[in-house]
Image (spheres, grey):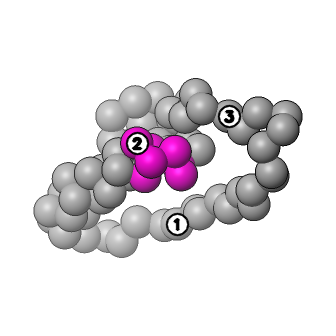
Amino acid sequence: MRFNGRMSSPAAPARPVFAVLYTYTDDPTTRDEVRPAHRAYLAELLGRGILLASGPWAPAEGQGTGR
């Protein structure tokens, strides 16, 4: 899991935080096709300071340890 290091200052107004959990389809071909666009979208949100965290939950779902 990757975290955006830019947290709000104590003087900044609080923002709502949402968590999105989803289940992959059984179609790895389509997942592999759309993954680059999905990661580019997440990178853009991170760059704008909108995304707080992202990443796979389990090693089987991609690179990483799920931690």
Marks 1 and 2, the one that precedes in the sequence = 1
- In this rendering, which labeled residue sits more in front, label 1 or label 3? 3
The C terminus lies in quadrant = top right
From the image, tell me which residue sits under label 1: 22
* Residue highlighted by disc 2: 47
Q: Which residue was labeled with disc 3? A: 7
| 34 displayed left or right of 7 | left
Check disc 3: other Cα within 10 Å, few if <14, some if 14-19, many if 20+.
few
Instruction: Give me the C-alpha separation between circle 1 and circle 3.
Output: 25 Å
Q: Is residue 13 above or below residue 26?
A: above
Residue type marked 3: Met
Q: Residue at x 53, y 51 (%)?
A: 50
Q: Which residues are magenta?
A: 45-51
Q: Secondary structure at mark 1?
A: loop
Is 47 included in the stretch rendered in magenta?
yes
Q: Is residue 5 above or below residue 22?
A: above
